[in-house]
Image (cartoon, rainbow, N blue to C red):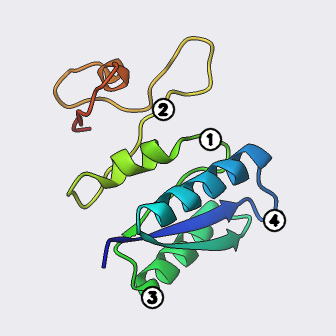
Amino acid sequence: MSESLYFPLIDNGMKLVRASYSACMFGLGVSCALAGRRIVFEPFSHPDPCATMNLATHAFLQSGCDRMVIIDGDHIFQPSDVARLVSHDLPLVSGLYPKKTIEPEWTIMPMNGESPEVLFAEGSQSLIEV
């Protein structure tokens, strides 16, 4: 059987998500199903982000899935973005995106001095250690 992925659908306790996020998750579900992956979507709603993640992590550990993939509800993404994240045989991989500012600001400091922008170059498949 192919890899199984667990996606906690997390909101801020008001049981609301953006329509664009829902559309992305729908596309992701279709893509995973077509690729033969087992997928589990499970909603979590709590006003405390730490409590929500604890609940989601506990549920993941009980799910029998191979990997948990967390995507913030205010981000738009493609199924290929998720495929790229899970393609690495590492215990923890994080997607990188800039802060929502006019000039891109990054919330990481690469260990090797490499600029985070290198990850967004056309055809880039590299990882950077942070």
In this rendering, the count of numbered labels is 4
Q: CA distance from mark 2 to mark 4?
A: 25 Å
Q: CA distance from mark 4 to mark 1?
A: 17 Å
Amino acid of disc 1: His
Q: Residue at horizontal 32%, vertical 50%?
A: 93
Q: Are marks 4 and 3 in contact (CB under 8 Å)?
A: no
Q: Which mark is residue 15?
A: 4
Q: Earlier in the sequence, mark 2 or mark 4?
A: 4
Q: CA distance from mark 3 to mark 1?
A: 27 Å
Secondary structure beneath dot 1 equals: loop
Give whichever of 34, 95 is nearer the camera: 34
Q: CA distance from mark 2 to mark 3?
A: 30 Å
Note whether 117 is above or below 60 in the view shown. above
Horizontal and vertical percent position of residue 117: 36, 19
Dot 2 surroundings within 10 Å: few (below 14), some, or many (20 or more)? Answer: some
Q: Earlier in the sequence, mark 3 or mark 1?
A: 3
Q: Earlier in the sequence, mark 4 or mark 3?
A: 4
Q: Which mark is residue 75?
A: 1
Quadrant housing the C terminus:
top left
Give whichever of 113, 93 is nearer the camera: 93
For disc 2, the marked residue is: 97
Secondary structure beneath dot 2 equals: loop
